[in-house]
Image (cartoon, rainbow, N blue to C red):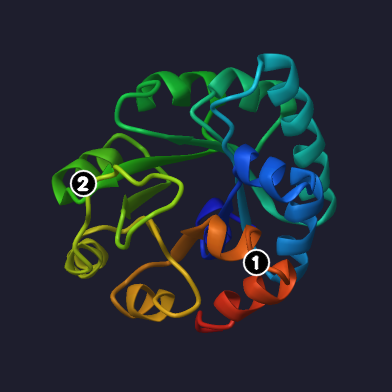
Amino acid sequence: MNKMNRLKGLYVVTDRQLSLDIGVATEKLVAKVIEGGAGIIQYRNKQSALTIRRHEAATLAVLCKEMGTTFLINDDVDLALEVDADGVHLGQSDTPLSNARKLLGQDKIIGITCHNDIELAKQAEQDGADYVAFGRFYPSISKPTASPASIDVLKFASEQLTIPICAIGGINQNNASALINHGADMVAVTYSVLGAKKVAQAAAQIKKLFPE
């Protein structure tokens, strides 16, 4: 399967603090969301020591490979290389895309955060990004201070870009459809799925909103 075909559907971003709060290991939560239909997992852990992050990332890389799910690392090209992840997701102030591509090669996936800015997205596509992410669209527990994005940016982006588009920020089972209908190929979630009482079921509810 080529990179483009892997970048669609439910995209789940891990949260170390959430796992600690509910007392369930990240690996177990991720296994459940994959069972529910998540096609992409992003490992995001800004708090822990490198030894913990290396262990968790390696464990998730094996799990995702076994379950046929795309595995990305947030903002750490070296860690992605070490665990042979499928790629990375980079913010505007992270490793430059050109540097990441040199280190990772052409086969790995690189996604770029573009906030609410079509011009950033166009530049990312021109520079070789595999997908772009816009957001936050709704109030977010994970990133409460993130600047808001307009839902119309998805429509404009889908008309002007050829690479897949991800929507992120406060997305749940009740508001995901609007984003998908406006052009999002992927919706990225954390709390609405990983924090649900029935994780696999919550994942499946969002997964079924996407056209087959």
Q: Residue furthest front?
A: 21
Label 2 or label 1, whichever comes before in sequence order: 2
> What amino acid type is highlighted by mark number 2?
Lys
Residue 107 visible in this rendered orientation of the protein: no
Residue that badge 2 annotates: 122
Depth check: 80 or 48 in front? 48
Q: Position of residue 52 (x, y in %)?
A: 74, 22
| Category of crowding for the residue at label 1, using alpha-carbon neighbours closer than 10 angstroms: few (below 14), some (14–19), many (at least 20) | few
Residue placed at 28% from the left, 75% from the top?
182
Q: On the rendered structure, is 134 left or right of 17?
A: left
Q: Label 2 vs label 1: CA separation? A: 35 Å
Asked whether disc 2 touches disc 1, contact meaning CB atoms under 8 Å apart, the reply is no
Residue placed at 51% from the left, 79% from the top?
210
Q: Position of residue 164 (x, y in %)?
A: 40, 58
Residue placed at 19% from the left, 63% from the top?
150
Q: On the rendered structure, is 160 left or right of 135?
A: left
Q: On the rendered structure, is 23 left or right of 124?
A: right
For the C terminus, the image quarter is: bottom right
Q: Secondary structure at mark 2?
A: helix
Label ID, residue 83: none
Q: Nearer the viewer, mark 2 or mark 1?
A: 1
Q: Position of residue 8 (x, y in %)?
A: 51, 64
Total numbered labels placed on residues in the image: 2
Q: On the rendered structure, is 99 left or right of 50?
A: left
> What amino acid type is highlighted by mark number 1?
Ala
For the N terminus, the image quarter is: bottom right
Depth check: 150 or 164 in front? 150
Q: Secondary structure at mark 1?
A: loop
Label ID, residue 196: 1
Residue 137 visible in this rendered orientation of the protein: yes
